[in-house]
Image: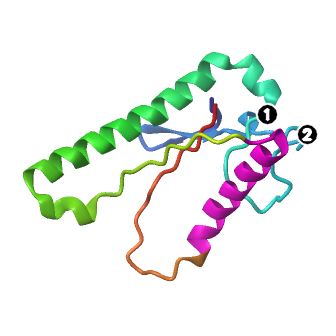
Amino acid sequence: MIEIVRSEHIKNLQEYYYSSFKLNDHNGASSIIDDDKINGLNMSADWAAEHTEELVKMFLYGTQLFIDSATKEINEYKKDSSYFDKIKTGGVFSTLKLSQEAQKKLFADIYKLLNEAEEKDQGTDKEEINFMVQKW
């Protein structure tokens, strides 16, 4: 899903630089979001069609990371219920009936919300969190 774009030999180590540029839709033809300020992964339909196995692996990997995090936090909570306030793993499950247009708008709104959350955050004790939004 990524490719090596350059490598450098530093002392006795080989350092590699990677890019996911080819994974993204750069022509905008299949974009559900018309805002070039949005950060995120927008896979082209052509790439997905040519790399089905890699696409499935990417979503399975993300799901496994979620399961691992949730399991770890549940086990911590079982040991000490005060851990509840530290839990950051969570999920939302919804079943909606939406038109294609409404589905595209919902995804665009979610992307925008995620993108703006970091820049609007006024807190000082920031930590990394991960989101994987799927629909089927």
Do callouts 1 and 2 mark residues in contact (Cβ within 8 Å)? yes
Q: Residue furthest front?
A: 97
Is residue 39 shown to the viewer in this render?
no
Quadrant where the C terminus sits is top right
Q: Residue at x 8, y 51 (%)?
A: 79
SS of the residue under disc 1: loop
Q: Residue at x 82, y 58 (%)?
A: 36
Q: Main secondary structure of the magenta part?
A: helix
Q: Which mark is residue 44?
A: 1
Quadrant where the N terminus sits is top right
Gap in Å between the C-alphas at discs 1 and 2? 8 Å
Residue 81 belongs to magenta span = no
Q: Residue at x 86, y 55 (%)?
A: 34
* Residue 86 placement: quadrant: bottom left
- Tell me the residue that label 2 is attached to: 29
Residue 108 belongs to magenta span = yes
The percent coordinates of residue 51 (x first, y second) are 69, 19
User: Which region of the structure is painted magenta?
Assistant: 98-119
Determine whether, in the image, residue 40 is placed left or right of residue 99. left
